[in-house]
Image (spheres, rainbow, N blue to C red):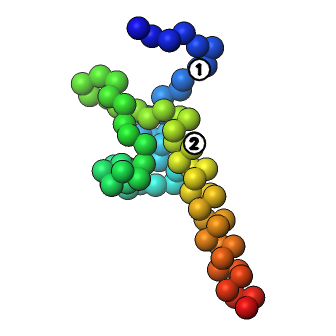
Amino acid sequence: KRRETNMVIKILRIEQVTGQTGLSRSSVYKQMRLGLFPKVIKLTARSSGWKESEVQGWIQDRLEESRRTQGSRDENIAS
C-alpha cells in the first residue's frame, strides 16, 4: 500500500546526476558499487534513476566532510 504524501519525489537520470555531482558516469557507478553513493532505482528494464533528495544529501555530506577536513588542515598549518 502506498503512503499518500504531499511530497514530490523527483527522479534524476544519469546525465543529471553527473551534472549535479561533477562525477563521471563510471565514477557514479563505482561509488555506488562501493556503497558510497545512493543506490539506483530501476524504472524500467532499460532505464534507471536516482532520487534527487538522496543525491543532494550525498553532495551535502561531501561538502560537510570537505569543510571538516579543510578545517583540520588549516589548524595544522597555523600550528
* Residue 42 x %, y %: 32, 28
Q: Is residue 40 above or below residue 8?
A: below
Count the labels in the image.
2
- The image quadrant of residue 31 is bottom left
Q: From the viewer's perspective, is 17 left or right of 27?
A: right
Q: Is residue 5 above or below residue 9?
A: above
Q: Is residue 61 visible?
A: yes
Q: From the viewer's perspective, is 12 left or right of 46?
A: right
The numbered disc on residue 56 is 2
* Residue 45 x %, y %: 24, 24
Q: Is residue 20 visible?
A: no
Q: Is residue 2 above or below residue 22?
A: above
Quadrant of the frame with the C terminus: bottom right
Residue pictured at 70% horizontal, 80% vertical: 74
Q: Nearer the viewer, residue 3 or 42?
A: 3
SS assignment at label 1? loop
* Residue 10 x %, y %: 53, 26
Amino acid type at mark 2 = Gln
SS assignment at label 2? helix
Amino acid type at mark 1 = Val
The residue under label 1 is 8
- The image quadrant of residue 1 is top left
Categorize mark 2 by other alpha carbons within 10 Å: few (<14), some (14-19), many (20+): some
Q: Nearer the viewer, residue 10 or 65?
A: 65
